[in-house]
Every structure is written in C-alpha cells, then in structure tokens.
Image (spheres, helix red, strand yellow):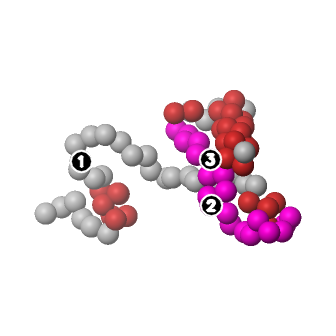
C-alpha cells in the first residue's frame, strides 16, 4: 500500500512538471521507493511526514549516444584532458 501511495505521489509530480511546466516527459524518470528508503523513523508522526516526499534530481549534462569521446568540458569536469 505504501508503495502505491508513493508511486501516485511521484506520478502526480511528474504530471505537474510535464503539463504545467512543459518539461519533456522523456527527460523524467519516476521511481517509487515506498518504505524502502526512509529518511526518518516511521515510529513518529513527524518521521512519517518527512518520509512522505518526492525527491527531484537535476542533472546539468545529458547522457548521449555517440562516438564515446568526451567533450573537452566533460573531460575537464572529470579531471582529465582530451589532448594526447
């Protein structure tokens, strides 16, 4: 039951982002954790309230399919150079 509620909550947030904020649905992944990843104890109401959450992760660069050669910026970010 908690998994279903968590999934419904996450689906509603995704719907809001795609409908109201015009974010491409293909750029979203919806995952429900249910009771598997609490951030607080479920033994108290305050803890349960903290566990009723949606986490949104924002990535600055997309992952693409290509030649496998990193861009100079990506290499610099990773701490390596693209020049021999």
SS of the residue at dot 3?
A: loop
Say above or below: 53 vs 19: below
Image quarter hosting the C terminus? bottom left
Cα distance between the residues tagged 3 and 2: 10 Å
Check the image and name the residue furthest to the left. 84
The location of residue 65, given as percent across then percent down, is 31, 40
Range of residues picked out in magenta: 27-46
- Mark seen at residue 32: 3
x then y, percent, for residue 13: 70, 41
Secondary structure beneath label 2: loop
Q: Nearer the viewer, residue 69 or 32?
A: 32
Q: Which residue is mark 1?
A: 68
Residue 10 showing in the rendered view: no
Comes first in the chain, label 3 or label 2: 3
| Magenta span main SS | loop
Q: Name the residue rendered at 32%, 69% in the picture.
A: 79
């Amino acid at each position: 039951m908690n998994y279903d509620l968590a999934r419904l909550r996450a689906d509603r947030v995704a719907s809001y982002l795609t409908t109201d904020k015009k974010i491409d649905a293909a750029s979203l992944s919806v995952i429900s954790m249910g009771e598997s990843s609490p951030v607080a104890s479920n033994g108290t109401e305050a803890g349960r309230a903290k566990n009723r959450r949606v986490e949104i992760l924002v990535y600055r660069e997309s992952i693409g399919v290509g030649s496998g050669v990193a861009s100079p910026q990506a290499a610099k970010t990773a701490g390596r150079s693209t020049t021999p």
